[in-house]
Amino acid sequence: MKKKSLITQRSLSLFVTLGLFVVMFGAGSLSFIGFFTLQNFLNLFMNTTYLMILGVGMTFVIISGGIDLSVGSLLSLATMVASSLLTKSHWNPSLVIPTVLAMGIAFGLFQGFLIQKFNLQPFIITLAGLYLGRGLCYVVSIDTIAIDNRFWHHMANVQINLFANSYISPSVIIAVLVVIAGIFVSRSTKFGRTVFAIGGNEQSAVLMGLPVARTKMFIYMVSGFCSALAGIVFTFTTLSGYSLNGVGMELDTIATVVIGGTLLTGGMGSVLGTMFGVLVYGTIQVLIVFQGTLNSWWTRITIGFLVFVFVLLQRALRARKSGTSSATQSRAEPLPRRS
Amino acid sequence: MAWWKRLTGKKLFWPLVALALLLAFNLFFTPHFFQIQIKQGHLYGNVIDILKNGSPIMLLAIGMTLVIATKGIDISVGSVAAISAGVVAMLIGGDLQGIPKHPIFESIVLAVLVCTVAGLWNGMLVSRIGMQPIIATLILFVAGRGIAMVTTNAMVVWLYAKPFAIIGQGYVFGLPFSLYMVVVLLLMTLFVTRRTALGLFIEAVGINPTAARFAGINAKNIILLVYAFSGFCAGIAGLIVCSNVMSADGNNAGVGYELDAILAVVLGGTSLNGGKFNLLGSIVGALIIETLTVTIYAFNVPPEIAQVVKAVVVYIISLLQSSKFRSSVANMFGRRELAA
């Protein structure tokens, strides 16, 4: 009985996100000529590949009840390291990509280790990680590094033609593959189920004999990996490394995860929802471009507002779930705890 | 050893030792560090610079201390400071003759008011809606910078009204004006939290909100109050930042201040787990950070890399505050056998 209500709630959140996307895209199509095209829809993916990859990692972190504020600066660090190795050290791309990914995993492992081993709050450790990553960018170089590598240029310029004169970039394929992998891992693997169990109730998960310690470290490694991969994909579009890439991207990522219906308190969420959250984000950006008079900073304000609305919605859904007892329960409920 | 125990037991002891060590290091390795001259009628030197440049962080740390004491966190302070700078710059603005568009005093009041409202918003989200503080303030952390950019039309706005410069650049009796603002705010906060029951209420909410509520404390309003106060402090800090350079840059004003402020509070001996707080400690913490920054500059390290040093300091402090870390270190040195 209880399980059933949980499933409906989950599909309800997904439905709300999907509905929001359809409404926003529909509103854009009605208001602006040339908005409702297949290419414009595919552009949503092309503009947000890095955000989708970041979102997948962040979804795991948030489902487990944690948070990772370092993703933006780790992305930036990945762009710096990749471009520095390519342009200054002339490494082969087949070496650069694994190195950068390994760096991301190591960074995630370091944070996960501190959080798990010493029971530190994820937000303070990853906030320090945010500054560490950003600072390390400047250690690599203070200036922008342009990438002049054939493989990178190829990845930046090649268009994969689909039907009806529409095309996508190779990065979209990477992003979609990451999303599919994320959906599979979260739903059908032991690791994925353990992540949900930790987010639901960590103590219960320990008592059930689940490998909580290992899983928690692994979650941050996944997020680190995704950040590094997102950094590489980011350089496929910008063809450069810059220390101020991805400033504030952590909120964008958290926002898309929340808009995608993942509970910030953990225990519930879906990677597929995150993908739709990212598409909503992309639609807002495109709408602001089409609208023309608003400056791009309105994206940030709108996103902040949407996060607010969705957190409210989550509270409302939870209140409905607990039903009649919610009135008494919410009064006795202790004040919010930090994740 | 009793006197030693009594000394180390003092809350301010370790932060002061850290500051003293840093200063001693500078005494030997940074030439002319303690030299103070009188230039243009005011004191001039590294130490004065630390006090002057550290005042925004000291202000933020005062607000942050109370927030952290309620087991909360406010990472929006840097963005809120940027809003304050943006609002005051747009209101005063002025032409090259230095005639302000709006009266300076009223503009300042309005800017600080806007920031207090921003703080109230954070407080509402945390206390009434029940968001986790980190998420609630994360919204303004980025949206706030958007608001600051929208207020200034995404441009750097310059101010030409001379009297406004006194906030960030002025000197009174040889000392920076901003320092007096810190002292006044500190004394007021100390008075309100230590001479009334408010400080006790804040600590009670941080230690156990449920118990505090059963004891008849209106925990929700206490939380609302501390976030509003943090916004207020961020507003004043934003004025100093704006006045320092006589311009408002929504993109760069107050970047990274949230970490500095949190770091100052934690260095000062207030635990991130809420409860007991130490306002004077936070001030010392802010001074440690500023001294560290000046020291890093003195060694010709690019200022951006200072972030790495700060991040490392956060790791160390977090570890020292973790009981798990302390017990595992204790185990390493065989204390367990002693205890058994």
Image: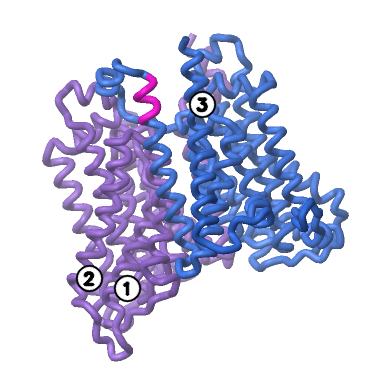
Three-letter code, disc 3: Arg
Secondary structure beneath dot 3 equals helix
Q: Colour of chain A?
A: blue
Type of the residue with mark 1: Ala
The chain to which mark 1 is attached is: B
User: Which residue is drawn at the image coordinates 37% and 41% (left, top)?
Assistant: B73
Dot 2 alpha-carbon crowd within 10 angstroms: few under 14, some 14 to 19, many 20 or more? some
Q: Residue at x 79, y 51 (%)?
A: A162
Is B146 situated left or right of A333 in this image?
right
Q: Position of residue A30 (x, y in %)?
A: 51, 56
Region in magenta: A316-321
Chain letter, colour purple in render: B
Which residue position is annotated with label 2? B107
Contact? badges 2 and 1 (CB < 8 Å): no
Residue B44 sits inside the magenta stretch: no
**In this rendering, would A196 be left or right of A302?**
right
Question: Would you say B278 lies left or right of A136 here?
Answer: left
User: Is A3 above or below relative to A172?
Assistant: above
Task: Say which residue label 1 marks.
Answer: B89
Return the x and y of residue A201 as percentages of the image width and height: 49, 18
Q: Quadrant of residue A226?
A: top right
What residue is shown at x 28% (from left), y 34% (from top)? Answer: B276
Q: Which mark is residue A35?
A: none
Identify the residue at horizontal 56%, vertical 63% (top origin).
Answer: A33
Q: Residues within 10 Å of mark 3 (few under 14, many from 20)?
A: some
The quarter holding residue B266 reads: top left
Query: Could you give the CA–CA distance between mark 3 and mark 1, rounded to whole angstroms?
Result: 47 Å
State which mark lies toward you, 3 or 1: 3
Counting from the top left corner in percent of width and height, residue A197 is at: 55, 19
Q: Label 2 is found on which chain of the structure?
A: B
Residue hosting label 3:
A10
Mark 2 is on which residue type?
Answer: Ser
